Amino acid sequence: MTASPDSSLASPGAPGTLPVIDPAAPHTDVKRRLAAAVEAARDEIVGLSHRIHAHPEPAFEEVKAATWVAEVLRGHGFKVEQPAGSLATAVRATLPGGRGGDGPRIAILAEYDALPGLGHGCGHNTMAASGVGAAIALASIADELPGEIVFFGTPAEERGSGKQIMINDGLFAGIDAALMFHPCDRSHVSSQPLASEDIEVVFHGLQAHASADPWKGRNALDAMVLLFSSIGLWRQQLRPDVRVHGIIQEGGTAANIIPERTRAWFMLRSPDQPYYDEMATRFRELVDAAALATGTTADVTFSGGAMTMRVNATLEARWVANAAAYGIVDQGPDPNSGSTDMANVSWVCPTIHPELAIAPEGTPGHSVLFREAAATPAADATTLLAAALVAQTAYELFADPELLAAAWRDFRGES
């Protein structure tokens, strides 16, 4: 929503400082206090972001990040479960409101997994820190809240759909709304993530000497090359808004041995769930054809499904209003969509997944440039801003039952 992270808003005052402004109505006094609580915890929040950035851990291996997140939350009065559910690096932290009663359970989410070989090229360190910062801010006024503040540290967004596993574990049962910020090269609240799934393909052949008697072997690498070629030809008939991409992880052991095993990791993506299902069926057929042509066999394993996003206009409108108080203008949905398992949460309860710029527009995600941007003063300032905006928007849901009811009407398609 800010035009550029190089603006005065992105680096107000001292590096990594939240600007002092008049928040958007309603509840301006409480929102001001929430922002002040974020600023008071600035060193703790920014320090957490930089620690996670300096120690990247891939999906399901985020031991340090999960531990650091849990430690900070315990220090602010949260009851922490670590691990939470079946995932060793998942965290659930809860803090009841002082007003008790049957108030809402509002969830603040955070991610902290890194990309293999790249580190935090998606900026999840800022997401972990901003989520923790929002939780800290809400904890500072917990005595005034009904219901319960719930924090989820969610592993494995980049691979494996940790949030879906946590949903299956029942951790999201009874959650009334979920909020999480994501860093980007532009700022917008609405997103259109693609349905996506990870696919592991393993071809099994038969070893033989590649020079003396290659006719005795069955070449698993030939099968994999044929599959990649088939996918390349298939793309011409695919809609332009879908994606198929992959890498070979095992291609053989020596040039003079006919490979008996190859393994690859693919991803399918589509903005339309029924069309995605058609793509998945066709992908299986291409694998079978490659195996048939080379006399090999194949194992195909689908995992880590991410869904399309269920948009909640009520929550989006409140985010836009709260962000506008900081001079932030929504830039509209990002035309370059990836995928996220936060979309899976949007089919469980009202959800938003807004993005704020930490890098100049045009900076590619999942890149060294974006990784470097995620540990700059501009990223620190955006992390603090995101923490304040998440906390302020969450507070509105605690304070206004009708707003929450409207969000649920959106969720059910009744408004």
Image: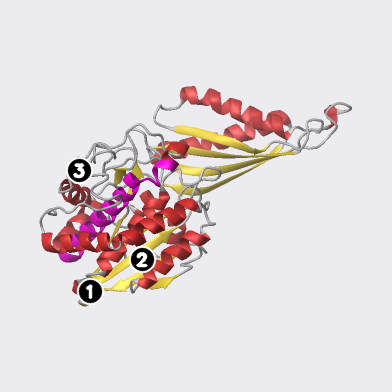
Crowd rating for badge 1 (residues with CA inside 10 Å; few <14, some 14–19, many 20+): few
Residue 28 % position (x, y): 11, 59
Q: How many marks?
A: 3
The answer to whether residue 348 of the structure is visible from this angle is no
Circles 2 and 3, Cβ within 8 Å, touching? The answer is: no
Vertical comparison of 347 with 66: above or below: above
Q: CA distance from mark 1 to mark 2?
A: 15 Å
Residue 238, numbered circle: none
Q: Amino acid at mark 3?
A: Ile
Q: CA distance from mark 3 to mark 1?
A: 35 Å
Q: Position of residue 329 (x, y in %)?
A: 19, 40
Residue 141 in the image: x percent, y percent?
Answer: 22, 70
SS state under label 2: loop
Q: Are marks 3 and 1 in contact (CB under 8 Å)?
A: no
Q: Describe the element under mark 1 as helix, strand or loop.
A: strand
Disc 2 residue crowd, few under 14, some 14–19, many 20+, Cα 10 Å:
few
Residue that label 2 marks? 173
Q: Is residue 127 above or below residue 69?
A: above
The residue pinned by badge 3 equals 328
Q: CA distance from mark 2 to mark 3?
A: 34 Å
Q: For residue 100, which quarter of the picture?
A: bottom left
Tag 1 near tag 2, CB within 8 Å: no
**Residue 184 point in image, percent of width and height:** 34, 41
**Magenta residues?**
372-399
Question: Which label is found at residue 102?
Answer: 1
- The foreground one among 47 and 202 is 47
